[in-house]
Amino acid sequence: MSGKHNKQERHSYPLERANIESKRFSLFEIKRWVENGSIQASNFQRESGVWNLKQKSELIESILCGIPLPAVYLSETKEHETQIIDGKQRIETFVDFMNDGFSLSSCLSIVAEIAGKKFSELNNAQKRKIQDYQIAVYEIPHHIPEYIKSLIFARVNL
């Protein structure tokens, strides 16, 4: 393939087919997808486990308070797998907490009574609120070029 063709292809964005869909999914659904291998991290995602306990705990506390969280960006690959474009740390935190992977930090400032607890130690109403929490998800179609997906990641992380 000539360099000229490659450069032209790199700069052509499929505007007529660029339908990035906005959806909402429960954390329970997202957890199920992760556990059955339906979602994978993309090449431009940070390593796993970057967040500290305070950040993870405040994310869970925010969910219980009903605070809207930033959207997660997913993309379907040509092989019909789902890639995380942005939101890996949040998704890992949701799944890890619902699987009793960590106890909440003692530094919580809004819902202090859940400090130090694992998911299984929360009351049923709190567990349901976490599992049923709806997060905004933007789905990027598989025909969007990989370099555009990496640019999307960079732009939502400015």
Image (cartoon, helix red, strand yellow):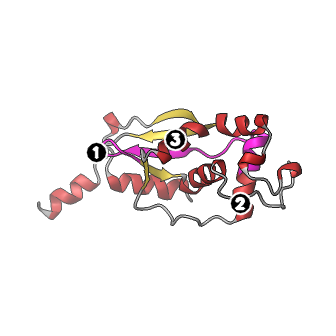
Kindly tell me whether residue 110 is visible in this rendering.
Answer: no
Tag on residue 32? 3
Residue at horizontal 30 percent and vertical 42 percent from the top: 143
- Check disc 3 and report its element: helix, strand or loop: helix
Q: Quick check: is 77 in the magenta stretch?
A: yes
- Check disc 1 and report its element: helix, strand or loop: loop
Q: Quick check: is 86 in the magenta stretch?
A: no
Residue at horizontal 36 percent and vertical 40 percent from the top: 141
Task: Say which of marks 3 and 1 sits in front.
Answer: 3
User: Label 2, label 3: how many angstroms apart (C-alpha)?
Assistant: 23 Å
Residue 68 screen position, x and y as percent: 69, 41
> Counting other residues with Cα less than 10 Å from the Cα at mark 1, is it few (<14), some (14-19), or many (20 or more)?
few
Residue at horizontal 58 percent and vertical 44 percent from the top: 71
Q: Is residue 118 shown left or right of residue 17? A: right
Camera-side residue: 132 or 42? 132
Tag on residue 79? 1
Amino acid under disc 3 = Arg
Amino acid under disc 2 = Gln
- Check disc 2 and report its element: helix, strand or loop: helix
Task: Assess whether mark 2 and mark 1 are in contact (beta carbons under 8 angstroms).
Answer: no
> Counting other residues with Cα less than 10 Å from the Cα at mark 3, is it few (<14), some (14-19), or many (20 or more)?
few
Range drawn in magenta: 60-82
